[in-house]
């Protein structure tokens, strides 16, 4: 799957942020948390809990942007991690104006 600008506006449920968010909104909140907390920022728990990257993976799987599966509660059952990491990196590049 080729990641495009409009993929940033696809939504998924974020338990960490308390509702449906777009990938664009999630990346903004993540960057804002880094800026707000500075040296106290926790890459393991940027929003208070670990495993936060699974929400992004679930969104990618939901929209069939990467290979994977979700369980009955929409938690990640399996994700092709290499694809997911590349997709997220590409989304960030596009969002920052470095990609197509």
Image (cartoon, helix red, strand yellow):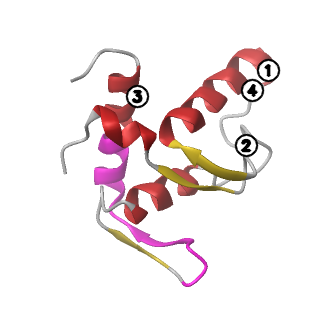
Under tag 1, what secondary structure? helix
Q: Is residue 88 left or right of residue 32?
A: left
Under tag 4, what secondary structure? loop
Q: Is the residue marked by circle 2 packed among few (<14), some (14-19), or many (20+) residues within 10 Å? A: few
Residue 87 occupies which quadrant of the picture?
top left
> Dots 2 and 4: beta carbons under 8 Å?
no
User: Residue 39's spot in the image, x, y percent?
Assistant: 76, 17
Numbered circle sitting on residue 52: none
Q: Furthest-bottom residue in view?
A: 72
Q: Would you name the residue on which mark 4 appears?
A: 41
Between the C-alphas of marks 3 and 1, the distance is 21 Å
Between the C-alphas of marks 1 and 4, the distance is 5 Å
Numbered circle sitting on residue 45: 2
Can you tell which of label 3 and label 4 is closer to the viewer? 3
User: Residue 8's spot in the image, x, y percent?
Assistant: 41, 37
Q: Would you name the residue on which mark 1 appears?
A: 37
Between the C-alphas of marks 2 and 4, the distance is 8 Å
Q: Would you name the residue on which mark 3 appears?
A: 92
Answer with mark 3 or mark 2, whichever residue precedes in sequence. 2
For the point 40% across and 55% down, the residue is: 60
Q: Is the residue marked by circle 4 packed among few (<14), some (14-19), or many (20+) residues within 10 Å? A: some
> Dots 2 and 1: beta carbons under 8 Å?
no
User: Residue 18's spot in the image, x, y percent?
Assistant: 75, 51
Can you tell which of label 3 and label 2 is closer to the viewer? 3
């Amino acid at each position: 799957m080729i990641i495009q600008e409009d993929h940033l506006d696809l939504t998924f449920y974020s338990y960490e942020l308390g509702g449906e968010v777009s990938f664009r909104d999630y990346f903004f909140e993540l960057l804002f948390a880094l800026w707000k907390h500075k040296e106290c920022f926790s890459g393991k728990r940027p929003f208070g809990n670990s495993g936060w990257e699974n929400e992004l993976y679930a969104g990618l799987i939901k929209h069939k942007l990467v290979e994977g599966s979700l369980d009955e509660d929409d938690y990640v059952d399996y994700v092709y991690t290499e694809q997911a990491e590349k997709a997220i990196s590409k989304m960030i590049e596009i969002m920052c104006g470095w990609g197509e």
